[in-house]
Image (cartoon, rainbow, N blue to C red):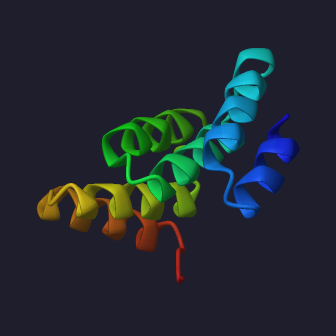
């Protein structure tokens, strides 16, 4: 289901992708479908919901730099600059170089 969601996300079918990520999360909660769901929500401009999804991904994998960067992107869109800068700093500390 996570891969189905990933492919739907690639096709810009974000709502359908989110449904697949939710199924994946229900069956096997883990960081990857949460982050993927966050990216789909972000693409829809649902930054509050995306932020929550990125935070769930971070709960599962707190040392994954990309998740911190994704969180920073959502915070930036919400005009939470100080928090975004902290998330970006954490991503960089963990090796993010994107």
Locate residue 81 relative to residue 69 in the image: left or right. left
- Of 4 and 91, nearer the camera is 4
Q: Is 51 placed above or below 75 here?
A: above
Name the spot of residue 63 as percent of width and height, x first.
55, 52
- Of 13 and 78, nearer the camera is 13
Name the spot of residue 15 as percent of width and height, x first.
61, 40
Q: Residue at x 15, y 60 (%)?
A: 79
Locate residue 4 relative to residue 55 in the image: left or right. right
Quarter of the image that includes the C terminus: bottom right
Quarter of the image that includes the N terminus: top right
Image quadrant in which you'd find residue 18? top right
Name the spot of residue 53 as percent of width and height, x first.
48, 37
Q: Is 19 placed above or below 44 here?
A: above
Residue sticking out furthest to the bottom? 97
Q: Residue at x 34, y 56 (%)?
A: 74
Q: Residue at x 76, y 61 (%)?
A: 11
Number of numbered markers: 0
Locate residue 13 relative to residue 24 in the image: left or right. left
Residue sticking out furthest to the top? 26
Image quadrant in which you'd find residue 34? top right
Locate residue 62 relative to residue 29 in the image: left or right. left
Q: Residue at x 36, y 64 (%)?
A: 73
Name the spot of residue 51 as percent of width and height, x first.
38, 44
């Amino acid at each position: 289901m996570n891969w189905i969601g990933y492919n739907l996300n690639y096709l810009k079918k974000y709502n359908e992708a989110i449904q697949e990520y939710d199924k994946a999360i229900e069956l096997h909660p883990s960081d990857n479908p949460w982050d993927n769901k966050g990216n789909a929500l972000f693409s829809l401009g649902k930054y509050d919901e995306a932020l929550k999804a990125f935070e769930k991904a971070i709960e599962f994998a707190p040392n994954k730099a990309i998740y911190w960067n994704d969180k920073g992107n959502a915070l930036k869109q919400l005009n939470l600059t100080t928090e975004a800068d902290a998330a970006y700093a954490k991503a960089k500390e963990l090796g993010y170089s994107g």
